Image: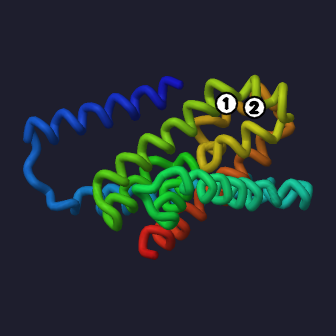
Amino acid sequence: MKGSLIIIAFFVLGIICGVMHWLPDLNGNISFYTLCALLFSVGVTVGNNTELLKSFRQLDPRLMLLPLMTITGTLAATAVASIGLPGRSLSQCLAVGSGFGYYSLSSILITQYQGPELGTVALLANIIREVFTLLGAPLLVRYFGPLAPISSGGATTMDTTLPIITRCSGQDFVILSLFHGFLVDFSVPFLVTLFSTL
């Protein structure tokens, strides 16, 4: 929860700096370099943790389908929601939904392809998804089972929502949560780019 509040605080600070013109005009290049640095950091983190990759092999093959179900369910729900949003195309809604909670990456990509308005929508939608999982995990487990907060967390299940998932779903779901987050996380740049360019 603290991490989410810090991210929101930096977002608000960025808006204030932009409105007040406290920073030089960077023509969008800073977003690209920040994105490259972020992806490099994720790659280094995964590459340094060989035990994580080994533990993925021990998962029940049926549970390995959970990331695919999360992606499919999110895109299906987003497609249905797009019917009630006449100002936005199906592809724009799917681009926002394809963030799966990975707000730092998806909002930058969508801003580059679709503009800052939709990029801001993507940022807020994905932050809301993360906060919903952080706050709602106990209820999700109670009413829908231990896999529900993992699916709800999307790409965040390997980092920010992992502690609450571990506490509510149990230690048995840690490896699945990491695996889920890794695969959903990996799909974000491809799906967001695909739907943003349609």
Q: Residue 187 sits in which quadrant?
A: bottom right
Q: Nearer the viewer, residue 10 or 135?
A: 135
**Apparent side of residue 53 relative to residue 156 in the rendered image (left or right):** right
Q: Nearer the viewer, residue 120 or 12?
A: 120
**Apparent side of residue 95 relative to residue 47 in the rendered image (left or right):** left
Q: Are there few (<14), some (14-19), or many (20+) residues within 10 Å of tag 1?
A: some
Q: Are marks 1 and 2 in contact (CB under 8 Å)?
A: yes
Residue drawn 40% across the image and 34% down it: 7
Distance (Cα) linking label 1 and label 2:
5 Å
Residue drawn 60% across the image and 31% down it: 132
Residue 24 percent across, percent down from the top left: 8, 49
Relative vertical location of residue 159 with respect to residue 35 in this rendering, above or below:
above
Q: Which residue is mark 1?
A: 163
Q: Are there few (<14), some (14-19), or many (20+) residues within 10 Å of tag 2?
A: many
Q: Nearer the viewer, residue 130 or 56?
A: 130
Residue 121 percent across, percent down from the top left: 40, 47
Residue drawn 53% across the image and 50% down it: 84
Residue 122 percent across, percent down from the top left: 44, 49
Q: Secondary structure at mark 2?
A: helix
Q: Amino acid at mark 2?
A: Thr
Q: Amino acid at mark 1?
A: Pro
**Apparent side of residue 97 relative to residue 113 in the rendered image (left or right):** right
- Whether residue 170 can be seen here: no
Residue 15 percent across, percent down from the top left: 23, 37
Q: Which mark is residue 180?
A: none
Q: Which residue is mark 2?
A: 166
Residue drawn 49% across the image and 61% down it: 95
**Apparent side of residue 106 relative to residue 14 in the rendered image (left or right):** right
Relative vertical location of residue 142 with respect to residue 116 in this rendering, above or below:
above
Relative vertical location of residue 54 with respect to residue 163 in this rendering, above or below:
below
Q: Residue 133 sits in which quadrant?
A: top right
